[in-house]
Image: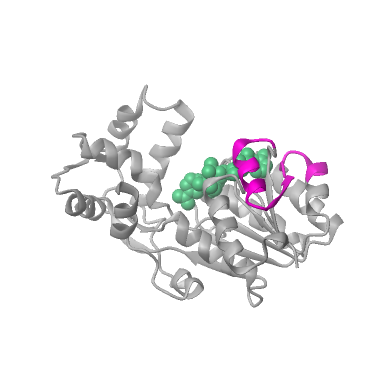
Amino acid sequence: MKFLVTGATGRLGGKIIEFLAKKLPITDIIAGTTNPTSENAQSLKAQGFEVRKTDFEDQASLVEAFTDIDKVYIVSTFPDVEMAIRQQTNIVEAAKQTGIQQMVYSSAPNADVCDFFLAAHHRERENIIKESGIPYVFVRNNRYVENELGKALASINGAPWVTAAGDGQVGWVSRADLAEATANVLAGNSHENKTYELGGENLAQADFVAVLNEITGKDIQVMHVDDAAFGETLKGKVPEQLASMLAMTQIGIREGKSVNNSTDLEMLLGRKPMTVKEVLQQLLA
Ligand SMILES: NC(=O)c1ccc[n+]([C@@H]2O[C@H](COP(=O)([O-])OP(=O)(O)OC[C@H]3O[C@@H](n4cnc5c(N)ncnc54)[C@H](OP(=O)(O)O)[C@@H]3O)[C@@H](O)[C@H]2O)c1
């Protein structure tokens, strides 16, 4: 059986490839990337992986890459609904033409019902896969602890922890645990047409900062602000589109859209997921 992992030179896809290689012969694992000549792609090649071009905007590249593949992992891309529909249609058409037996897609928490803006493109992508009739597995990834590394480092260096997320909790996860769980799904054979909610420890912003303080011995203060003030803190520091996404993410978290109520991640890992403390300790080591 042959497996293709798209986004294999990305941070999540790269880890999925690593975990898959611990379970399967390397000759059965194909690394998909938009740019097979990149340094990361060449490094995968040097490790023994076959590398193929997989650009979701280029259906022909997908047909070629999916040929002789049984299971394919599809990484999510930028959260734009129009783009998601175009890319997922290309993917599904290529999968139909090449007889893909299973598609594993990394989605977002409660993507089918959640009104969080980040869920919208995932819902479209899930629906397109479901409508294709191709067997699927949806792994709905909660928020990476890694997303907060930049903010954590700035706070360690004296910046306050500014948030508009209030007491909203996030079911924090590490990329490594998500990747291992996804590799287990790909290599396993009892997951057909299942949807897994992959979340970890629920912590609000103040709890997260308390963990950070415990690890670093610092006294980082949490500054709770409203949405307008939060938006102001980002002005000139990040591109406008990203600033808007970050601000909307704070609202979603505040409204409880990132709370985890599932033990799916623990079940797929066969152990407890890493705690926020464990992930932060690794990131800050
Ligand atoms: N749960 C969370 O907290 C969270 C946070 C941020 C993002 N995400 C989502 O999770 C995804 C994976 O996260 P990550 O950390 O691995 O991000 P990442 O390191 O930025 O990787 C994104 C991957 O998307 C691939 N990609 C982009 N455009 C593509 C296209 N047109 N066709 C095929 N592949 C394309 C890239 O492939 P190449 O390297 O081959 O170009 C890259 O490997 C992100 O893309 C995003 O949708 C989730």
For the point 73% across and 67% down, the residue is 135
User: Does residue 81 appear anywhere in the picture?
Assistant: no
- The quadrant holding residue 136 is bottom right
Which quarter of the rendered picture does the N terminus lie within?
A: bottom right
Tell me where residue 99 appears, x and y as whole percent: 83, 62
Q: Which region shows up in magenta?
A: 37-61
Q: Is residue 123 visible?
A: yes
Q: Magenta stretch containing residue 20, yes or no?
A: no
Residue 7 shown left or right of residue 135 in the figure: left
In the foreground, 86 or 29:
29
Which residue does the image show at 70% across and 39% down from the upper left? 36
Of the four image quadrants, the one with ligand 1 is top right
> In front: 235, or 32?
32
Viewed as shown, does residue 52 lie left or right of 239? right
Residue 112: percent from left, percent from top:
57, 60
Q: Is residue 254 left or right of residue 104?
A: left
Total numbered labels:
0
Q: Residue at x 40, y 68 (%)?
A: 261
- Quarter of the image for residue 194 reads bottom right
Q: Is residue 110 left or right of residue 193?
A: left
Q: Residue at x 45, y 26 (%)?
A: 239
Residue 160 sits in quarter: top left
Q: State the residue lying farthest toward the right.
A: 97
x%, y% of residue 27?
72, 60
Residue 250 place in picture, x, y as percent: 36, 44
Query: Which residue is more in the foreground, 232 or 255?
Result: 232
Asked which colour scheme the image uses, the reply is one colour
